[in-house]
Amino acid sequence: MKPHPIHTFHIPVMGLSYTVDTPLRVAHYGISSVVSITDDELLEKMRAFYSAQFSVPYKEIKQKFNDYRAKRITSYLNFMDKLVRDKVDAFKNELSGNREALEKYITTLPHASEFKKKLESLLHSGEHIKDSVKTYLDAFFLPGAIDVNVMTKVDKPHFDKDNTPLPVAFNDAHAAVRGFAQSNLNSSLVLSAGMNPRLYSYLETFSAFFPDAAGQLKKKIVLKVSDFRSAMIQGHFLAKKGLWVSEYRIESGLNCGGHAFATDGFLLGPILQEFKDKKHQLVTSAHELLSKALEIKKLPVPQDLLPLKITAQGGVGTAEEHAFLLSYYELDSVGWGSPFLLVPEATSVDQETRTLLKNAHEEDFYLSNISPLGVPFNSVKGVSNDFWKEKRIAENKAGSSCPKKLLALDTTYESSGLCTASKKYQDIKLKELESLRAQLTAADFQKRKNAVTVKACLCVGLANASYLENNMPVKGQQQGVVICPGPNLAYFDKEVSLAEMVQHIYGGTSVMTQENRPHFFIKELGMYTEHLQNEMASFSDNATATQIKKWSSFREHLLNGIAYYEQLFSEVTFFTTQRLTIYTALQHYKTVLTGIKFS
């Protein structure tokens, strides 16, 4: 027997900083999590911070060093890997030598897991408990994975002192991939935000992403996807290069935190059903392409199908929803993100922001336009970044100083790129707008101005929470904190311990006090219905035939999703106490959607 993952949930990446050190906090408990490796400056400062905490020698990797970005990422990941291994050894010794600690840990494990059952039997076996527990843990305890995330589109090019472009390998996302590939980690690269063929092709240059003679992968590839078609296209693209996708991480378009990549009305339930029905097709078609590519490259060709995991995340909030996804859709794991923002043991959040989150209500969570990427961004009212941004606008100093330039991707005015949240970019746009003032109504002028100045500096705002939590100096222009929780966090209203949250996931207790929380499928349906209505309301001119066709197709997909849910909830044995509420909500949204007029 091989050791298997201990838990049936994972903690997805959250922002730049919120899970930056989560593996150091939870991996020794067997909990997997994902670290953003976008901000090398943050990683370098966190390595310096933890080196002091653990009395480890530290030597700074400065920006003047060659390939400093990749080297910083590699150093931080290796540093975490070493600390996690040490913490795992210490934790196993604690469990084998402390009966109370072992009993407490057992209460946080999945009820049906063989790992839990075996530990319980050893606990009550009588003699030689310490030796038997230690022997079992050494053989079967699997630490949580230290996975990393790269947003594929955040791949800004770099230039030398003469403003000559550096090779593509020095682009931000490319350097991040290299930093991970050269690290000691045996874990996964989670690629999100869509397909970047040039970056995908770059993976070919690292042997660690190819299977060895035994079919094992040192570095695995995980793709965040929104539907089955996208998974097939991206998976085949990589397979043709001899690269295997080990996991497809399906994300609810509007019911997750971070950027909201809305689908064309396709709901999570039907999407998961298609993955369940066609998983074998996904595996076999990719394996055939993979084998041909590896043969051409004269690399080992796996004789057996390589493992493929299907996971999902977005809005899950109860033990029953968690168990339902695992059982009905046969998922390998479920992502629990935003609720862990209220677990100080798991995530890096400053106290002011954590207090704001626990006191926030449904109406405080909204989709904003603050992201320089031009993609809707989950936000919560009252974050400190809003205060500082509005203060600069009131003083006619709109925009950020843009110290990191990670999102300086707009090349309209400079070939090297500007961030749309930067003062330099906004000064240009506001000057252009001022020249049009006489031609615009006051309302239209203000609307256009707001569209420019609403953008926030995510590079700094999404990193500041870690600096503030750890009392590290925050240099430069005051940006405050930006945070991107999913709307599901509205139903969690208190800080809880890690053990309590894990027990909540598995049904041992409940940390929610809200009684009117909608089923997460229904919440997503409501958000998509509202999204369609807002899209139509924001269209000031007469809609074209193409636009009407798009809206009609969007509505049709939602209605098909409702029909799917009506059938689903009539068959499954889950959610019996919510059945009436669910059916009522489905009928409500069906009425709303069928009543929409497109002309």
Image (cartoon, grey):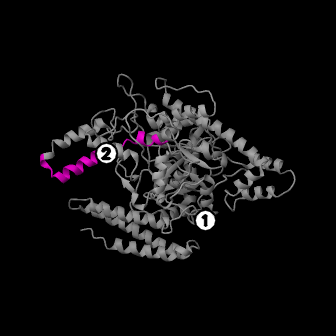
Q: Residues within 10 Å of mark 2 (few under 14, many from 20)?
A: some
Judge left or right: residue 250 versus residue 145: left
Instruction: Estimate the x, y position of residue 596 in percent, counting from the top left.
Output: 30, 70
Is 440 contained in the magenta span?
Answer: yes
Q: Which residue is mark 2?
A: 390
Residue toward you, 436 or 535: 436
Element assignment for label 1: helix
Residue toward you, 523 or 148: 523
Q: Which mark is residue 327?
A: 1
Element assignment for label 2: helix
Q: Tag 2: residue type? A: Glu
Q: Tag 1: residue type? A: Ser
- Residue 212 visible here: yes
- Residue 411 visible here: no
Residue toward you, 1 or 365: 365
Q: Which residues are magenta?
A: 438-465
Q: Quadrant of the C terminus?
A: bottom left
The mark closer to the camera, 2 or 1, is 2
